[in-house]
Image: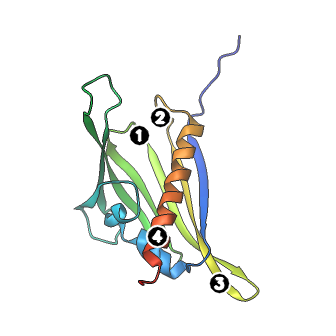
Amino acid sequence: MEEETQPLKWEGKTSAQLPTARAHEVWPFLEDFCNLHKCFRIDTCYHVDGIPGQPGLIRYCASTVPSSSGGQEGSVITMWAKEKLLLIDPIKRCLSYEVIDNNIGFKSYVATMRVLPIHDDEGERGCKIEWSFLCDPIQGQGFEEFSSFIESSLQFMVKKIEDALLPAT
């Protein structure tokens, strides 16, 4: 009987379109590395170390979630990660970061996010965000489950950005 082997690394990419937003309008939401909580499903995100907007910057991200262990009903845990900005390019509208410490189960995780304009014959018609990642397999989770989490997180982020860009009425 052949043993099923896990790949040494998980690699994936997803993207989501913002049909009414231009790339230069969306980029500031990603470029502001220590304010991820404004457009992502986390409770807090703040600067820990380094120079804002420069590689080497470290942010702390955390969320309090209901505990899934057999503990007391109503108990919560704080899931957190420290992430280091590896590269940021405002001209190409991309950034890369890595998880350097966490209690979520990442041993190695590097991601790149890009904001790309969508063009047609008449010019720029919206944009899309691409999120790619390379990581070690996460214990207790399958690749499809993790990829689905990344995709749903990106969809949530796009909705928050679209809502923030709506004109005030």
Which one is earlier in the sequence, the residue at label 2 or at label 3? 3
Mark 4–mark 2 Cα distance, whole angstroms, equals 29 Å
Which one is earlier in the sequence, the residue at label 1 or at label 2? 1
Decide if residue 18 is on the left or right side of residue 54. Answer: right
Mark 1–mark 3 Cα distance, whole angstroms, equals 37 Å
Mark 4–mark 1 Cα distance, whole angstroms, equals 27 Å
Which one is earlier in the sequence, the residue at label 4 or at label 2? 2
Give the labeled residue for mark 1. 106
Residue 86, picture quadrant: bottom left
Mark 2–mark 3 Cα distance, whole angstroms, equals 39 Å
Give SS at disc 2.
Answer: loop
The reply to whether the C-beta atoms of the residues labelled 1 and 3 are less than 8 Å apart is: no
Nearer the observer: mark 4 or 1; the answer is 4
Give the labeled residue for mark 4. 161
* Residue lying at the far right of the rendered structure: 121
Nearer the observer: mark 4 or 2; the answer is 4
